[in-house]
Image: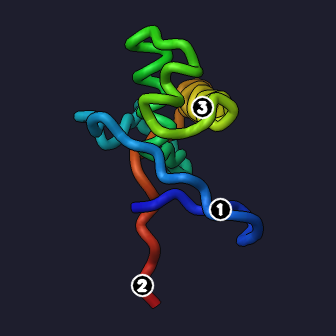
Amino acid sequence: MHRRRKGGRGRFPIQPRIGRKPKAEKMTPEPSGLEDPIHIDFAEVEVLRLVDLEGLYQEQAGKTMGISRGTVWRLLASAREKVTRSIYEGRPLVVGFPLEEET
């Protein structure tokens, strides 16, 4: 799956190289209702792995993924916000894109 641009305007984002897919496909907290899941894409997970797990600088992570340091920063901020929101709101965290409903 490819990343999508927001709002349908501007240029299409560069597709980052993903070193390896995570083993987990979703993180599900204790059931506390019918909360909507939070979707985190593969590029965000890869940035978390490279920067937070492997200890690379953002510039090094960008070179590894074939994207700019600014894009790494944006993906990292978004990924950290989603993980934190999942923990604090008790919402499932699903890796990958949401499945689009067939019409």
Q: Is residue 66 visible?
A: yes
Residue sitting at the far left: 23
Q: What colouring does the structure picture have?
A: rainbow
Q: Residues within 10 Å of mark 3 (few under 14, many from 20)?
A: many
Q: What whole-number distance in Å separates the C-alpha atoms at marks 3 and 1?
A: 16 Å
Q: Residues within 10 Å of mark 2 (few under 14, many from 20)?
A: few
Q: Earlier in the sequence, mark 3 or mark 1?
A: 1
Q: Position of residue 23 (x, y in %)?
A: 23, 34
Q: Which residue is mark 2?
A: 102
Tell me what residue is drawn at x 43 percent, y 21 percent: 50
Q: Amino acid at mark 3?
A: Val
Contact flag, marks 3 and 1 (Cβ < 8 Å): no
Tell me what residue is drawn at x 55 percent, y 53 percent: 14
Q: Earlier in the sequence, mark 2 or mark 1?
A: 1
Classify mark 3: helix, strand or loop. helix
Classify mark 1: helix, strand or loop. loop
Instruction: Determine which quarter of the picture holds residue 101.
Output: bottom left
60 lies above or below 6: above
Pick whichever, 96 or 19, lies toward us.
19
Classify mark 2: helix, strand or loop. loop
Q: Amino acid at mark 2?
A: Glu
Q: Which residue is mark 3?
A: 72
Q: Quadrant of the N terminus?
A: bottom left
Q: Position of residue 103 (x, y in %)?
A: 46, 90
Pick whichever, 103 or 22, lies toward us.
22
Q: Position of residue 61 (x, y in %)?
A: 49, 24
Q: Which residue is mark 1?
A: 5
Q: Earlier in the sequence, mark 3 or mark 2?
A: 3
Tell me what residue is drawn at x 41 percent, y 66 percent: 99
Nearest-to-viewer mark from 3 and 2? 3
